[in-house]
Amino acid sequence: GESAGAAPGADGPQAASVSVVSASAPAVTREAPLDLATYAVFAAAGAIGCTATHAVVVPLDVVKTKKQTDPAGFCGVSLLEGAKRLAAKEGRGALFLGLGPTMVGYAWYGLTVYPGYELGKRLLFQAADGPLGWTDPETGLVPEEVRVPLVLLAGALATCVACLGVCPAEAVRIRAVAQNSQHPSGAEGGGGNQIWDG
């Protein structure tokens, strides 16, 4: 008999149906191996995305920090009113205090957390599939009740590594805003160890 598939060049509903995957087909649950080039793309995308998004909200961070470090001057005012007050008092450039450390910190965050999550997830799945012996003997796959905690753990571990760069950068940013300087004293002249405070 003739094949049920559509002939080359055929059109209509029959041709369209050959590309549709059955709803009952099992989902793909194995993680595809990634090469260094792919990890590099993840790292670049993360660095660009995190740096850009956090740079945009620096003025909001500045006003928020001013409300915390200078309550007498900014307590009880909205973010918009605080921004207007700061710009009038110290100039518009004050709204971008700490821009440098913010960009450096979140470039590191994106650079590490995106590829770190993907790598960590695969390493954890390999451990579950191998030494830990958590593979389902029927499917040959790590069961869903194990996969979900491992995915969460991979994300948490990647974030911990990312925070090694974000935390000191945030400390420098806060000092920059509090001291009204792009070069806060806590980050220079022997005060570099202070960036880990808090």
Image: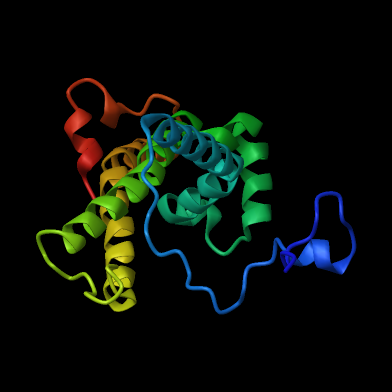
Position of residue 82 in the picture relative to residue 182 (left or right): right
Q: Residue at x 52, y 48 (%)?
A: 61
State left or right for residue 10 relative to residue 80: right
Nearer to me, 193 or 91: 193
Q: Is residue 152 above or below residue 144?
A: above
Decide which of 95, 39 is in the foreground and name it: 39
Residue 55 appears at what percent x and percent y? 56, 38
The quadrant where residue 126 appears: bottom left
Percent x, y of residue 84: 69, 46
Q: Residue furthest top?
A: 189
Q: How many marks?
A: 0
> Residue 46: x, y in percent?
48, 40
User: Residue at horizontal 44%, vertical 35%?
Assistant: 38
In-image side of 95 versus 81 (left or right): left
Compared with residue 105, is residue 11 higher up or lower down, i.e. above or below? below
Residue at position x 52%, y 37% in the image: 45
Q: How is the image coloured?
A: rainbow
Task: Indicate whether 140 appears above or below 40.
Answer: below
Please indicate, yes or no, whether residue 179 appears anywhere in the rendered image: no
**Residue 87 on image: x %, y %:** 65, 38
Please state if 167 lies on the left or on the right of 129 as rendered: right
**Visible in this render: residue 39?**
yes
**Eyeballing the image, is 184 above or below 158?**
above
On the image, which quarter does residue 194 sit in? Answer: top left
Q: Residue furthest right?
A: 12
Name which residue lies at 38% across and 40% down: 34
